[in-house]
Image (cartoon, rainbow, N blue to C red):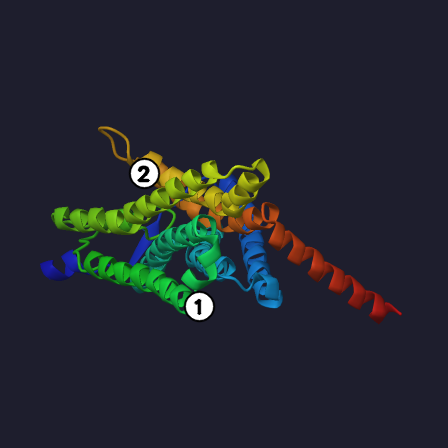
Amino acid sequence: MGADNQTWVREFILLGLSSDWATQVALFVLFSVTYLLTLLGNVLIVLLIRLDSRLHTPMYFFLTNLSLVDVSYATSIVPQMLVHFLAEHKGIPYVSCAAQLFFSLGLGGIEFVLLAVMAYDRYAAVCDPLRYSVIMHGGLCARLAITSWVSGSVNSLVQTTITFQLPMCTNKYIDHISCELLAVVRLACVDTSSNEVAIMVSSIVLLMTPFCLVLLSYIRIISTILKIQSTEGRKKAFHTCASHLTVVVLCYSMTIFTYIQPNSSPSVLQEKLISVFYAILMPVLNPMIYSLRNKEVKGAWQKLLGQLSGLTSKVAT
């Protein structure tokens, strides 16, 4: 009987962001609108890239993957949050919690690797423009995308498996907005040092390694841009990278500055805010950044709206 009590938990209770009813209702409205904008923005970006042949390039192929990751990541966390905002009982079944951890952790890892892949694409475009189409051929793009998805998924499968083999005793209250890795590990009633080492190693592999590759790519890119003689040429080269660089800064900055603090570790509140940032804000910001800062995407929008306007006029007449 003691072993059963130590290892089996039928469901977990998510404590979420607030226990105040008015705050939960306000957050429900805010996050519902944001989630709908996330779905709309990312689906429109994917459709636009599919419909406009001018956007059938490696950069937009990777952007399609990024949009799919963003929608999937938000969907793995936000709908359950919305239900819990209005529910009195904020439980999540054991299996559902494991599934949520697997998908959110996997998709987060995929996004970081994808950003490194996109940085390499921008490096090839700026530093070797004459050979860009030869370097970034279809086969390489497909392999890089597959590598991103496989690496994030394999890491998530390993982490989820070893985490849910831990005995949880009678601990079932997760002080988080979702079944986040560290929050679940904290529930274990055994020594979790080996799990923490595994988490640290995977963080280095799937967070710091892509970050270093992005950094190296942009050092080379900036070095190349500074060598360009004409001001117009420098502006054009920088514009090529502006959208991706903006997304990279947003995506990495909060995690880097939160976790790399001397003699301290992130508080539970900080961890919750990080999760809200990546689940709510990043997925809705990415399509906006690529739409507002990118001439090709704005041109494709104008073309599509023009076609729709013409079609509407024909139907009306």
Nearest to N terminus: mark 1 or mark 2: 1
Asked if residue 275 is positioned above or below residue 260 in the image, the reply reads below
Identity of the amino acid at label 2? Val
Left or right: 12 as drawn, with respect to 83: left
Q: Residue at x 36, y 37 (%)?
A: 270
Circle 1 — which element? Answer: helix
Q: Is residue 161 visible?
A: yes
Identity of the amino acid at label 1? Gly
Left or right: 124 as drawn, with respect to 32: left
Circle 2 — which element? Answer: helix
Residue sitting nearer the eye, 183 or 54:
54
Within-10-Å neighbours for mark 1: few <14, some 14–19, many 20+: some
Q: Residue at x 84, y 65 (%)?
A: 313
The residue at which mark 1 appears reads as 138
The residue at which mark 2 appears reads as 268
Q: Is residue 87 visible?
A: no
- Residue 23: x percent and y percent? 50, 39
Residue sitting nearer the eye, 134 or 41:
134
Q: What whole-number distance in Å separates the C-alpha atoms at marks 1 and 2? A: 43 Å
Q: Residue at x 46, y 43 (%)?
A: 245
Tell me, for residue 170, which label it has, or none. none
Residue sitting nearer the eye, 201 or 298:
298
Considering every residue shown, the one lying at the far top of the view is 263
